[in-house]
Image (cartoon, coloured by chain):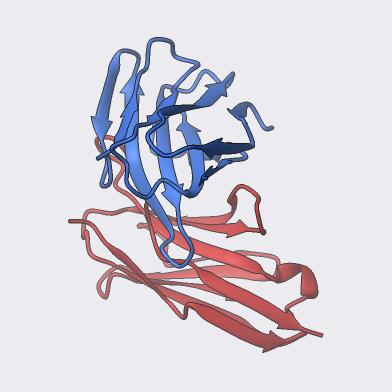
Amino acid sequence: GENVEQHPSTLSVQEGDSAVIKCTYSDSASNYFPWYKQELGKRPQLIIDIRSNVGEKKDQRIAVTLNKTAKHFSLHITETQPEDSAVYFCAARRDQGAQKLVFGQGTRLTINP
Amino acid sequence: DGGITQSPKYLFRKEGQNVTLSCEQNLNHDAMYWYRQDPGQGLRLIYYSQIVNDFQKGDIAEGYSVSREKKESFPLTVTSAQKNPTAFYLCASKDRGPNYGYTFGSGTRLTVV
């Protein structure tokens, strides 16, 4: 079945440094890749997404890159701040059919002051 | 709650009891989804519905049931057959078309006592 692998499971960086989270997906027909941020006890919030016809997308300090050939996509956060501390999830889905999101296992990001 | 409301926020279940989690949306979205979240495992799909009076099993449907009698409502029943129901349950909805992501509810934390 469809599967999304996410690494690392935990990541600790110094404030101001960059953080990178990587995901690999199994379904080659996937063409939409969102990233969610979830604070403790809260709902996941969409922070950025990318479609398969685009290789990179940037929104201020956040960027996502996609390598369709390798079935790999990554989240990059630059100039990290304490409020970036949260759990981040990647996900993948097809545009056709039920459009179910398949999620990675999550990365707990901690920004150290 | 961004147009999708889950209740209650916390729910306690005794062994052998069925409980129902509510999910209501006023976004006029066609598709609705139920996910279960356990620590370190990301979000796993329980059931989904693309249209009123129709729903399909997700990856972990055993011990759960749903109904979709109204477009706005997609309640989830956790039955006594679910052996390990303690988890955080998230409901999501989505508009038609490939260019839309999920809107999540705020979640229900279910604990077996």
Task: Please state which of residues A64 and B87 is positioned toward the viewer in this rendering.
Answer: B87
Is A80 displayed left or right of B73 in the figure?
Answer: right
View extreme (right): residue: A113
B36 lies left or right of B24:
left
- Judge whether B21 appears above or below A4 on screen: above
- Residue B74 occupies quadrant: top left
Q: Eyeballing the image, is A2 above or below A23?
A: above
Q: Is residue B60 above or below residue B64?
A: below
Image spot of residue A4 (x, y percent): 32, 64
Q: In this figure, what is the number of numbered marks?
A: 0
Give left or right: position of A8 versus B7.
left
Task: Tell which chain the image draws in blue.
Answer: B
Would residue A101 be seen by someone viewing this image from the given angle?
Answer: no
Q: Which chain is red?
A: A
The residue under the point 28% across, 70% down is A71
Q: Can residue A3 be seen in the rendering of this structure?
A: yes
Q: Where's the N terminus of chain A, which quadrant?
A: bottom left
Question: A64 or A108: which is nearer to us?
Answer: A108
In which quadrant will I find the C terminus of chain A? bottom right
Residue A89, image x, y percentages? 49, 62
x, y percent for residue B49 = 33, 26
Indicate left or right for A105 with B8 as reference: left
Q: Residue at x 38, y 38 (%)?
A: B98
